[in-house]
Image (spheres, helix red, strand yellow):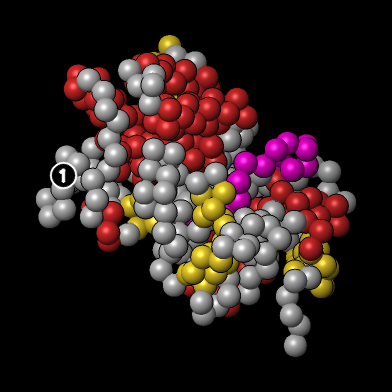
Amino acid sequence: MRLWHKAVIPLLILAVASGCYLAFSKPETKSATNNQAQNTTAFEDAPTAQEDSSPETPDVVISKEDLHKSDVPLPDVKKEDLEKAKKTVHELHMYFESGFVYEAENWIEKYSDPNSPGWVFWEKTGTIEIPGYTEKVYNEKDGNWYIQRLEEVKAAFADKTAFTDDITKAEELISEAVKNHDIKNLWYAHQVLHDLDYWVLNYPIQYPKGTAAPPDWKGVETYFGVTKTLKGFYQTALEGYIYDEQTGRYINKITGVWYVVKDGYKVIPPEEYIDRAKVETIDGINITDRPNDVWKLKEIREITIKSGDTLVDIINPYFMNEHFRMNYEWYAKQVLKLNNITDPHYIKAGDTLKIPIYIDKGAKVN
């Protein structure tokens, strides 16, 4: 399973240089049809380095075999309202799932960059044409369209506090994602819709244990555990962890790695150092970035820029391989500062680039 920390690395050196907000860090995915930036290379005379993005869907999942053992507490409402909710939430969930799962949509690549012109599709409906990005197309669904559909569901469940709170949470996450161009909030909204669809409204109620769900229902066995409706219903420690009442932590009995539940998410918080050697044992938990002040400069390496290199291509392997749980925006700023780079679009073949290598102060050095 891929970990949250490995999930998405937006390559936003330009945004860093201009002081823009970096949405979230981590890697992989193949290019989508409408990629927001063409990657230019360093030439012998007047080279440039343009940002590109290549991430993948973050897997923050909790797959449990016993999710079918009890009846999910479906809200007690009129049958027609319940059927409408089941249909609407499933439809919206499928839109989000196709965006994150299917390569043709590839929301991660399209929207990891908060400056991507693609965000206009979340901001307005109607005919949209963006030269160099997309031909003239008609957009039927913006962020408000999703929110309005959820409002229709919420209206029928007015006296069901936990369920309406979950719907409101999805609305707020979509609204914040559109407002701040933040792909991470779109992913969180997907988690809420996923749990409401598969574990509250449709499955396993509609497709009980032993009955196959439709083949297009990807991840139907996955439970994120982020809804109030199901709070406490499936809240058990991950396998191999025990709950410590005094600290509120779930502690791994072998590695000692611990997590807490925050806003419905299982999280290893920034203050907790974990040994890189133990990372592969951590499944189903959000792994947050460490605070910037825990990083101590270990060494500076020097490389010679070659023709065809981009700044992103050069520094990314060092970031990924050497700096587990480091904030990408912070690291990019250190590279720019160390090399006195004011315009990251321009690097020159033959020049020397200094690469800072840091060590986490929490690491025990032998």
Q: Tell me the quarter of the picture where residue 75 sits.
A: top left
Per the image, the residue denoted by label 1 is: 207
* Front position in the image: 255 or 232: 232
* Residue 67: x %, y % from top left: 28, 54
The picture places residue 37, in percent across and down from the top left corner, at 57, 38
Q: Relative to residue 46, is residue 219 drawn left or right?
A: left
Q: Quadrant of the N terminus?
A: bottom left
List x then y, in percent, for residue 144.
47, 18
Residue 286 in percent (x, y) is at: 54, 55
Q: Residue at x 44, y 72 (%)?
A: 240
The kind of residue tagged 1 is Tyr
Is residue 139 shown in magenta?
no
In-image side of 169 versus 153 (left or right): right
Identify the residue shown where x is 36% and y is 49%.
Answer: 233
* Number of residue marks: 1
Whether residue 51 is visible, yes or no, is no
Q: For numbered disc 1, what is the local secondary structure?
A: loop
Which residue occupies 68% across, 53% down?
328
Judge whether 289 appears above or below 207 on screen: below
For the stretch drawn in magenta, the main secondary structure is loop
Category of crowding for the residue at label 1, using alpha-carbon neighbours closer than 10 angstroms: few (below 14), some (14–19), many (at least 20): some
Q: Find out whether residue 27 is within the magenta segment.
A: yes
The stretch in magenta equals: 14-28
94 vs 16, left or right, is left
Residue at the limit of the structure toward the top, as seen here: 126
Which residue is rendered at x = 55% and y = 78% of the image? 255
